[in-house]
Amino acid sequence: MSLPKSSGKDQQAIWSARYLGAGTDYLFGIAPNRFLERRAGLLTQGRTALCVADGEGRNSVWLAEHGLEVTALEITSVAVEKARKLATGRGVLVNFEIGDMMAADWPPRHQQNAFDWVVGIFIQFVGAQDRARQMDGLKRATRPGGRILLQGYTPRQHLYRTGGPSDVENLYTPKILRELFADWIIEELVEYDDDIAEGSGHVGRSALIGLIARKPESA
């Protein structure tokens, strides 16, 4: 998901209100993100996964259904309550945590170099000045040989206006992601347009980018 530019407390309040406003519906649906879903075959190359800014659980629950031991991080308890209901209804276990991935002490020591997969789906709530710090947190959570999977919007998304942040500097380009992961092995980097239907939050033609990058064994 993508969050407005604001402090952690502001983001918590904003997203609590949005999830409450969806009522019993799931703002971004209950199906997994399509870029993630289409890479299901790769998930056998790992046992543990961390899903950040996980919202109402659609991606973490799907990962758990595919046999991974999943931890999900989300900033608002409103979303986590709905995520827990989704996991229970689907018969899987997910370790749901409430926290801010932009906090100075994240990830905690026990989650550093811990995960085979770190998944960030539409986490474009920071601009250029904070993006490297955000990605450094994801990198620290990934074990040597593990992978980060990202899905986001490109600046062309402002032509479609079907979701995503209003600030263009929050959006990804291939150049931005190559620079951020210059010290990693980029296994896939694709930029494309597609029609998406992810609840009421993301609907319609969208300008998308997807990345899979692997942490060097020596890191």
Image (cartoon, rainbow, N blue to C red):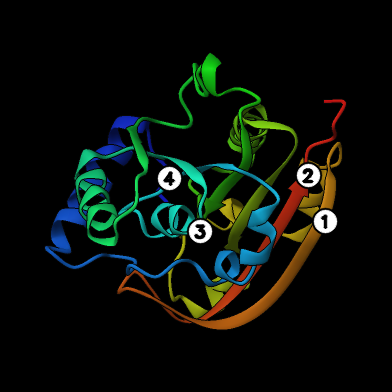
Alpha-carbon span between mark 3 and mark 2: 20 Å
Q: Earlier in the sequence, mark 4 or mark 1?
A: 4
* Residue 138 locus on image (x, y percent): 61, 35
Q: Earlier in the sequence, mark 3 or mark 2?
A: 3
Alpha-carbon span between mark 1 and mark 2: 7 Å
Q: Residue under circle 1?
A: 187
Label 1–label 2 contact, CB within 8 A = yes
Label 4–label 1 contact, CB within 8 A = no
Alpha-carbon span between mark 2 and mark 4: 20 Å
Q: Which mark identifies residue 111?
A: none
* Residue 4 locus on image (x, y percent): 39, 49
Camera-side residue of 8 and 61: 61
Residue drawn at (57%, 51%) of the image: 170
Q: Amino acid at mark 4?
A: Ala
Q: Residue under circle 3?
A: 66
Alpha-carbon span between mark 3 and mark 4: 20 Å
Left or right, 219 with respect to 130, comes to right
Where is the C terminus found, in terms of image quarters?
A: top right
Nearer to us of marks 3 and 4 is 3
Q: Residues within 10 Å of mark 2 (few under 14, many from 20)?
A: many
Q: Earlier in the sequence, mark 1 or mark 3?
A: 3
* Residue 136 locus on image (x, y percent): 66, 30
Q: Classify 104 as above or below 18.
A: above
Residue drawn at (86%, 41%) of the image: 182
Q: Amino acid at mark 2?
A: Arg
* Residue 130 locus on image (x, y percent): 59, 34
Label 1–label 3 contact, CB within 8 A = no
Q: Residues within 10 Å of mark 3 (few under 14, many from 20)?
A: some
Q: Which mark identifies residue 53?
A: 4
Q: Amino acid at mark 3?
A: His
